[in-house]
Image (spheres, helix red, strand yellow):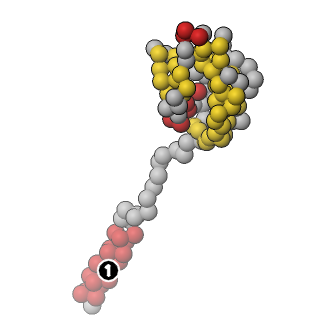
Amino acid sequence: MKKLIKASIVVAAIFLLTGCGKSNEKQTTEKKEEKISVTVILKEDDKEFDKKELKVKKDESVQNIMEANYKVDMDKEFISGIDGHKQDAGKSKYWLYEVNGKQPDVGATEYFVKDGDKIIWTLNEL
């Protein structure tokens, strides 16, 4: 009888311990990054040559969006070329950007997009 009780205790302990063990389910602690939609339009001499609807991280800078989605050339902290379309200081031709029809008071590294923003980059003579 004592052997039966000991065996029952051992079996119960095994079930108890396996029930308290680690779960094989993967627990994710990563917070999903919220994505928003923005539109980027590129123009040269007022003619549109590219348009993209993009899903980007919330509060991403215009600069980071451009570098992630286009071949961007830089001159110090300014964009000097986008996908082979380059500024020409001799012709006073430069890249400027606007968001939702307004030119921001800050550079592309300091402007953080919101859902639905329409970003237009224009390469024109000044």
Coordinates of residue 85 in the picture (x, y in percent) = 55, 26
Residue drawn 60% across the image and 31% down it: 59
4 or 114: nearer the viewer: 114
Residue drawn 58% across the image and 21% down it: 108
112 or 27: nearer the viewer: 112
Instruction: State the image quarter where residue 87 is shown.
Output: top right
Q: Is residue 91 above or below residue 69?
A: above
- Is residue 63 in view? no
Amino acid type assigned to the residue bearing label 1 in the image: Val
Residue lying furthest right: 101
Asked which secondary structure carries label 1, the reply is helix
Does 47 sit left or right of 9 as displayed? right
Instruction: State the image quarter where residue 5 is shown.
Output: bottom left
- Is residue 104 in view? yes
Instruction: State the image quarter where residue 18 is shown.
Output: bottom left
- Which quadrant: the C terminus? top right
Residue drawn 34% across the image and 69% down it: 17
Residue bearing mark 1 = 11
Q: Is residue 78 above or below residue 117?
A: above
Coordinates of residue 51 in the picture (x, y in percent) = 66, 37
Coordinates of residue 84 in the picture (x, y in percent) = 51, 29
Coordinates of residue 44 in the picture (x, y in percent) = 65, 25
Does 110 sit left or right of 22 as displayed? right
Residue lying furthest left: 3
Q: Residues within 10 Å of mark 1 (few under 14, many from 20)?
A: few
71 or 98: nearer the viewer: 71
- Which quadrant: the N terminus? bottom left
58 or 1: nearer the viewer: 58
Residue drawn 46% across the image and 14% down it: 76
Residue lying furthest bottom: 1
